[in-house]
Amino acid sequence: MMDAMNDLHPTPPPGPTNVMALVAFALSVLGTLVPPAALGGVVCGHLARRQIRARRESGDSWALAGLILGYLLILLSLAGILLFGGFVATMFGIMAFM
């Protein structure tokens, strides 16, 4: 009985993989070496997910992985900048008392 139900509503085959999703993931991975590339990965990831929904393509997992990695790298970069700024401010504060 269940096979008859599946024949009535077959699932459409997945569309081609969205190229922007692959670019988003590649840019986010490149962001580990070149931090500004992570921002490109985030932008491309959002654009890819919108295209995937509109065109019914596959590759949403690539876009999502690019978004997660990109946001994580941006967060770590900002934390590093704040930490470095705190160290510099502390060093100048210590030097002022010498």
Image (tube, rainbow, N blue to C red):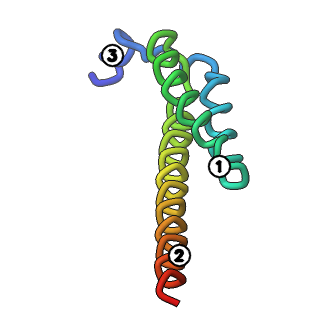
Of mark 3 and mark 1, the one earlier in the sequence is 3
Q: How many marks?
A: 3
Q: CA distance from mark 3 to mark 2?
A: 77 Å
Q: Amino acid at mark 3?
A: Ala
Q: Locate residue 34, reporting x and y percent.
A: 71, 49
* Element class at badge 1: loop
Q: Secondary structure at mark 3?
A: helix
| Helix, strand or loop for disc 2 | helix
Q: Residue at x 51, y 58 (%)?
A: 76
- Closer to the N terminus: mark 3 or mark 2? 3
Residue picked out by circle 2? 92
Residue 92, placed above or below residue 56:
below
Q: Are the residues at dot 3 and dot 1 in contact (C-beta closer than 8 Å)? A: no
The Cα atoms of the two marked residues, 3 and 1, are separated by: 53 Å
In the picture, the disc for residue 4 is 3
User: Which amino acid is tagged 2?
Assistant: Phe
Which quadrant of the figure has residue 21?
top right
Which class describes the residues within 10 Å of circle 1: few (<14), some (14-19), or many (20+)? Answer: some
Q: In the rendered image, which residue does mark 1 sit on?
A: 35
Q: Position of residue 78 (x, y in %)?
A: 49, 54
> Residue at left 47%, top 78%?
93
Q: Residue at horizontal 54%, vertical 71%?
A: 88
Callout 2: 10 Å neighbours few (<14), some, many (20+)?
A: few
Q: Is residue 82 left or right of residue 2?
A: right
Task: Choose the circle earlier in sequence order: 2 or 1.
Answer: 1
Give the vertical position of 15 relative to 95 (above or below).
Answer: above
Q: Is residue 60 above or below residue 7?
A: below
Q: Does residue 19 sit above or below 91 in this rendering?
A: above
Q: Evaluate if marks 3 and 2 touch, with contact meaning CB atoms under 8 Å apart.
A: no
Residue toward you, 22 or 17: 22
Choose mark 3 or mark 1, whichever is in front: 1
